[in-house]
Image (cartoon, helix red, strand yellow):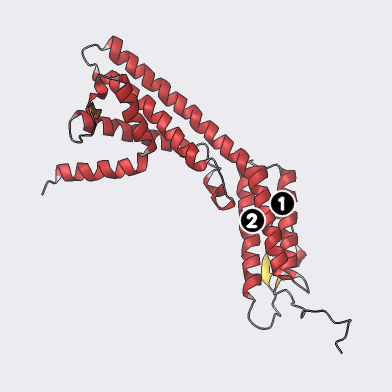
Amino acid sequence: MPDPQQPDQAVTRGAFEYENNDRSEKFNLRPRPNFVGQIPEDQRKISQAVYEARNVLKLLKDDKAVSDALFQEFIQRVTQAGDVGCVASNVHPKLADEALEQIRADIVRRAGRPLVYRYLGVLVVLALVGGALGLIIAHVGAHCWPNSPMLAGYGYVLIGAMAGAWFSVAAVRWQISFDSIPDYPDIYLEPVIRMLFVAFVAAVFALFLHLSVITIKLGNLDFASFTSSISVALLVGFIAGITQRALSVQLTARAQKFLDPG
């Protein structure tokens, strides 16, 4: 007869410990010095997940994307999950993994989504600035430099490119995952570089069309007519904006072929 006082499962001791029992944001989750045998794989994964969550939280805190109170709340929950999964005298890695998954979902909901809205907000401001610059160029080309009407076309291409760039980013980045959070905190440099890159690619694309280095026709629509048609210019820019990366590769390959025909 089995002893009713005995547990149904063998006790699994945690292979890790919090150095000096420190469960603050500066914790060091290390293997126990006196642990005998190989560290179980499920406990090792829990320890890695705990560190990953802390690193993302510290990134959000440094960027002021989470308040100190919210940061401390999440750190406490993360260290508690680590305690359950790889530290306690009787660990339960599966329960800890489920808890960490819930913590990651909460981080995305309470900190990740506002981060996306902030990023897209900065990007739309830059797109409006770029569009305003394009409108100024178009106005100068149409009224102040009437002998060069193509300049107005380039201005409208820039307007279309700004709209296309924002649309392409918003379509992809509207949803955020825990793993992609580190891609968002930088709102001061990355969006500016991105929009400058889009503007440059769009200008080069339009120049190649104007010089017939590239010829694109859809039915009776010739993309080279962007210098005389506002709608075509906006379309050329929009396409350049939404295909910025692929287009830059194609333009580079065409330029190399043009310079080295052999």
Characterize the local packing of mark 2: few (<14), some (14-19) or many (20 or more) Cα atoms within 10 angstroms.
many
Q: Position of residue 140 (x, y in %)?
A: 31, 14
Q: Position of residue 23 (x, y in %)?
A: 75, 60
Do callouts 2 and 1 mark residues in contact (Cβ within 8 Å)? yes
Label of residue 10 in the image: none
Which residue is the site of mark 2? Answer: 53
Image side of residue 150 versus residue 29, left or right: left
Residue under the image location 69 percent in, 77 percent down: 33
Residue under the image location 74 percent in, 71 percent down: 91
Residue under the image location 33 percent in, 17 percent down: 138
Q: Is residue 151 visible?
A: yes
Characterize the local packing of mark 1: few (<14), some (14-19) or many (20 or more) Cα atoms within 10 angstroms.
many
**Is residue 56 shown above or below 10?**
above
Q: Earlier in the sequence, mark 2 or mark 1?
A: 2
Q: Position of residue 247 (x, y in %)?
A: 31, 41
Q: Which image quadrant for residue 32?
A: bottom right
The amino acid type, in three-letter code, at marker 1 is Phe
Residue under the image location 29 percent in, 15 percent down: 141
Q: Which image quadrant for residue 9?
A: bottom right
User: Element type at marker 2?
Assistant: helix
The amino acid type, in three-letter code, at marker 2 is Ala
Q: 4 or 57: which is nearer to us? A: 4
Image side of residue 102 versus residue 156, left or right: right
**Disc 2 versus disc 1: distance between alpha carbons?**
9 Å
Looking at the rendered structure, the number of numbered marks drawn on it comes to 2
Which residue is the site of mark 1? Answer: 74
User: Element type at marker 1?
Assistant: helix
Q: Which image quadrant for residue 94?
A: bottom right
Work out which residue is located at the far front of the displayed protein and give it.
219
Q: Is residue 189 visible?
A: no
Q: Position of residue 222 (x, y in %)?
A: 23, 28
